Amino acid sequence: MSSSKLVAFILGAGTHIGSAVAAQLREKGYRVALGSRNPKPISDDDAYLSVKVDVQKRESIEEAFDTVLQKLGPVNVVIYNAASVAPPPTPDDLLTIPVEAYYDAASVGLGAFTAAQKALPSFRNEIHREHPKAFIVTGNILPFSQYSPPAYHTLGLQKALQTRFIATAAKSYESENFQFYFATLVSKEGGIPGPAVFASSAETHAQVYWNLINNAKQEDWDHRYEFVIFLFDICSIHLLFFFRFTIDGNKFPVEAEKL
Ligand SMILES: NC(=O)c1ccc[n+]([C@@H]2O[C@H](COP(=O)([O-])OP(=O)(O)OC[C@H]3O[C@@H](n4cnc5c(N)ncnc54)[C@H](OP(=O)(O)O)[C@@H]3O)[C@@H](O)[C@H]2O)c1
């Protein structure tokens, strides 16, 4: 295992944003823990650690952080990328959402608090005195309006919980220079980016997150950015024809391994 003291934990590390951010961090000397409910085993790369975590469950987040601490050391970067959406079974009939699904969606939002609470002692560890300390939630614009379409209400709910938390944490820990961001890719008009744009935006996220991590001091916690075309993204625009897409990313891109 590499001896780098720079450690990042990505919760909700899938094939899109998580994968691109992990590669960027790895290239910059980080060891990266990749957390999801069904993590893929990683072979022959001692910069990565696969960690099982379900962010709907507080204990699971706490155990996952303990595993990362034990195997890689204290984290100085956390990316909270997991999300879920539970549309009403009867479209537009909001109250047909099963109450369990509603609470589960809220748990994904609340999990950011648990993750940050577990990260805090690591941020304060002497080992990271000279390192950046950053906690980034992958956002969307839903929480910036009180109304969201019923199909996306649960997703907006969890992002709203996260914006409440991130906005306050950004101020609370400014003096220690622990930075908190809700990072949102937006369209040119400032709205939700189209599926094609989002699906090809992995490198944009990776660049933006890297810049946020390395900000000298806390900037606006509500960080919105547009898609920038990278060479890799041009390839992924073509690959999009083979992929399926949903707003929460859960089904994206399920066919990738068959290509
Ligand atoms: N800016 C926008 O408008 C916009 C648009 C779309 C998406 N987004 C955001 O982008 C993020 C997802 O993007 P992505 O493309 O990187 O998705 P992705 O590649 O599908 O990765 C997300 C990963 O999260 C994991 N996950 C889901 N639920 C989890 C849970 N309860 N606990 C732990 N891990 C969980 C999934 O793996 P497992 O199944 O193995 O757990 C999945 O691989 C979300 O935060 C979403 O809200 C923003």
Image (spheres, helix red, strand yellow):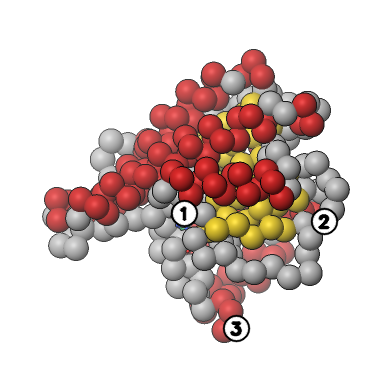
Q: Residue at x 67, y 43 (%)?
A: 69
Beta carbon at label 1 within 8 Å of ligand 1: yes
In this rendering, the answer to whether 112 lies above or below 219 is below
Marks 2 and 1, the one that precedes in the sequence: 2
- The C terminus appears in which quarter of the rendering? bottom right
In this rendering, the answer to whether 76 lies above or below 179 is below
> Is residue 153 in view from this perspective?
no
Q: Residue at x 26, y 58 (%)?
A: 87
Query: Which mark, residue 54?
Result: 1
Beta carbon at label 2 within 8 Å of ligand 1: no
- Judging by the rendered image, the residue that carries numbered circle 3 is 259
Q: Secondary structure at mark 3?
A: loop
Badge 3, how many Cα within 10 Å: few under 14, some, many 20+?
few
Q: Please state which of the two labelled residues, at mark 2 or mark 3, is closer to the viewer.
A: 2
Measured as percent of width and height from the top left, residue 135 is found at 59, 36
In the image, taking residue 121 as reference, residue 252 lies left or right, namely left
Query: Which mark, residue 1?
Result: 2
Question: What type is the residue that disc 2 sits on?
Answer: Met
Badge 1, how many Cα within 10 Å: few under 14, some, many 20+?
many
Q: Quadrant of residue 183?
A: top right
Marks 2 and 3, the one that precedes in the sequence: 2
In this rendering, the answer to whether 151 lies above or below 43 is above
Question: What type is the residue that disc 1 sits on?
Answer: Asp
Nearest to the observer: residue 118 or residue 200: 118
